[in-house]
Image (tube, grey):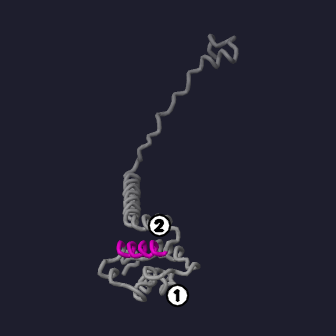
Amino acid sequence: MNEELKGLSLAELLDRLEPIPEPAPVSMLPQTGGWVILGLLLGAMLISVCIALWKYWRRNGYRRTAIDEIDAARHDPVALARILRRTALAAYPREQVASLSGRDWWQFLNANCPKPPFTEEDGTLLSKIPYQKMPDDFQLTPAVRYWVKHHQTKVESGR
């Protein structure tokens, strides 16, 4: 044993110890090229998803506008019929929609929606809205709102 260490207390001996050297900091950079490629692929996928969502949001702006107008119409059948026609004109080619009236009009609406919202009675009344007073119990708002939210354009249905 070393002579200079004789007679020292344990605390004094511990004070004379040299500190353990700290290891080098761990690098946060990937150590292999595979992780870099995976990170780039995930980043590209995230950007693609964000772009697709943005395009979807922009493509359906007319639906959001129509829903706001439906809320403002407060069950006015004439206003609801106009909103329905404008929405159809925004979603489909003018040549396909503008000339439709009567039975052809509401059948077109039902044909382009997964669950047809208009019964034959509703469709008949829908055709007469601009020309005569509607019955007090005629509620068009739920069907119009459903059609605006759920109608399918050619892009959406894959036609």
Q: Residue at x 52, y 71 (%)?
A: 75
68 shown above or below 107: above
- Of residue 131 and residue 25, the one placed in the foreground of this image is 131
Circle 1 crowding by C-alpha within 10 Å: few under 14, some 14–19, many from 20: few
Q: Is residue 87 left or right of residue 144?
A: left
Viewport quadrant of the N terminus? top right
Please state the extent of the stretch shown in magenta in the rendering.
77-90
Which residue is farthest left?
95
Mark 1 or mark 2, which has the lower sequence index?
2
Residue that mark 1 sits on: 121
Nearer the observer: mark 1 or 2; the answer is 1
Circle 2 crowding by C-alpha within 10 Å: few under 14, some 14–19, many from 20: some
Numbered tag placed on residue 55 in the rendering = none
Q: Secondary structure at mark 1?
A: helix
Q: Is residue 70 left or right of residue 11?
A: left
Residue that mark 2 sits on: 67
Viewport quadrant of the C terminus? bottom left
Q: Is residue 46 left or right of residue 120?
A: left
- Magenta-drawn stretch contains 60: no
- The x and y percentages for residue 127 are 44, 84
Secondary structure mainly formed by the magenta segment: helix
Q: How many marks?
A: 2
- The x and y percentages for residue 66 are 43, 67
Give the amino acid at mark 1: Glu
- The x and y percentages for residue 128 are 45, 84
Q: Secondary structure at mark 2?
A: helix
- Of residue 44 and residue 53, the one placed in the foreground of this image is 53
47 shown above or below 91: above
